[in-house]
Structure formats: C-alpha cells, structure tokens
Amino acid sequence: MKHEKNSIQQILDIGTGTGLLSLMLAQASNANIDAVEIDEQAAQQAQENFDASRWKKRLQVIPGDIRELSFPHRYDLIISNPPFFANDLKSADQQKNYALHSSALTFEELISAAVKALHRAGFFAVLLPFHRTDEFIELAKKNRLFLHEQILVKQTEKHTFFRSMLWFSSTKTDTKKSELIIKKEGQYSEEFIQLLKDYYLYLV
C-alpha cells in the first residue's frame, strides 16, 4: 500500500532492532519516527545507526517495553517485524530469545499496543512468517483492526510462501491481495527490484 510522502507525519516502529526499517521509512517519507526497542544493546546500535544517518533529526530511539510505554500522540503508521517463532526450541541466549521468539511480546500484546497508539485513520503494518498469517489476521479482527492489503512472499516460483506483509486499519474494506516472488530464473524479479532498489545499490 502506497502513500504520499507528506500524508504520514508520525511513525512508530515496534521492536526496531538495529533500526533498519525505521531508516528505510525515513528515507521514503518526511515523517518523524519513534523506534521502540526492549533490548539494550540493540537500542544502542539503533541509536548509533540513526546518528550516522542524514535523517537523524527525524529519528528517535525509545528504549523500553512497548507494553509499559505511553505516547503523547497517536501515529499515522505503526510498523513491526515481530518475533518469528512461537513454539520452536529456544536458545540459551536471552537476547536471541527476544529477537526470535514470542516470549518477549505476544501477538495479542503487539496488537493491543498498536490499537492504543494508532490514529483512527492510521495504518498498522506487519511482516510475519507465512504460517502465522491467518492467526494474526483473526487476532487483529477481534481488536477491530481489519486487513486492507496482503502481500505473500516466496523465494522463487517453485518455493512455497514464507513471509506475509499485512496492512491493517480500523476501517473495513475489501482486501487487496498479491504475491511477491524474490527471484525468477535465477535473477531478482522486477517487482523485488522496484520495491527495494532505493535501499540496495546492487539492485540498481
């Protein structure tokens, strides 16, 4: 789903990690971006990455737990790439657990945090493992967030889907559905290049 650069003024990134998605959105918009990260080392790295960028005046790292935070305003866009593995074997490394597992933040808690922080005309976007897509959509619907757009991602035409990009809002509408194939005939697809060429020089 595309927006004019000036239509989104405030963005919240939940679980920013080292800040990659926030940096990409800062490049693609004129918005102010708050990036929340619970892991102290990741938050520090995100701050360093923001400080080294040309968009640092519009980027702010907020160290802490999204479940315990409150914000002075609502956001036009909330993004999240939440923990991937709900039930898989966990690492002994607690930082890896935060990054890869739902023990740090469940889908229910993520959706609840988004509902509280989202402007009534805003959008909530998530990147998920494909096998948890239906679960997330149903949980969002129970919280009156309705699916606007769904992009299913696969590595090649021969592979099965492995990621989903989902856009939600508080307004019911027909869902736009599409697919993204990363590589075709051993080369990056034109769709993938158009999506990421502004961020990766080797795709140009």
Image (cartoon, helix red, strand yellow):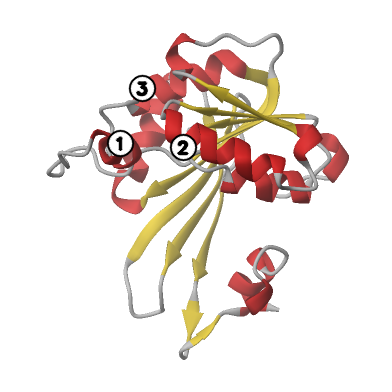
Q: Are marks 2 and 1 in contact (CB under 8 Å)?
A: yes
Q: Quadrant of the C terminus?
A: bottom right
Residue highlighted by disc 1: 95
Cα gap from disc 2 to disc 3, whole angstroms: 23 Å
Foreground residue, 5 or 180?
Answer: 5
Residue highlighted by disc 2: 42
What is the crowding at mark 2: few (fewer than 14 residues within 10 Å), some, or many (at least 20)?
some
* Name of the residue lying farthest toward the left: 89
User: Based on the displayed image, in which of its 4 quarters is residue 103 positioned?
Assistant: top left
Describe the element under mark 1 as helix, strand or loop: helix
The x, y position of residue 99, in whole percent, is 34, 39
Cα gap from disc 3 to disc 1, whole angstroms: 21 Å
Foreground residue, 136 or 72?
Answer: 72
- Left of 45 or right of it: where is 5? right
Of labels 3 and 1, the one closer to you: 1
For residue 4, above or below residue 171: below
Q: Amino acid at mark 2?
A: Ala
Question: Which of the marked residues, 3 or 1, is nearer the chain's N terminus?
Answer: 1
The x, y position of residue 47, in whole percent, is 61, 35
- Left of 197 or right of it: where is 85? left
Cα gap from disc 2 to disc 1, whole angstroms: 9 Å
The x, y position of residue 40, in whole percent, is 44, 28
Of labels 2 and 3, the one closer to you: 2
Q: Amino acid at mark 3?
A: Glu
Q: Mark yes or no: residue 48 visible.
A: yes
- Left of 73 or right of it: where is 155? left
What is the crowding at mark 1: few (fewer than 14 residues within 10 Å), some, or many (at least 20)?
some
Residue highlighted by disc 3: 108
Q: Residue at x 52, y 43 (%)?
A: 18
User: Based on the displayed image, in which of its 4 quarters is residue 120 positioned?
Assistant: top right
Q: Residue at x 73, y 50 (%)?
A: 2
Q: Residue at x 67, y 46 (%)?
A: 23
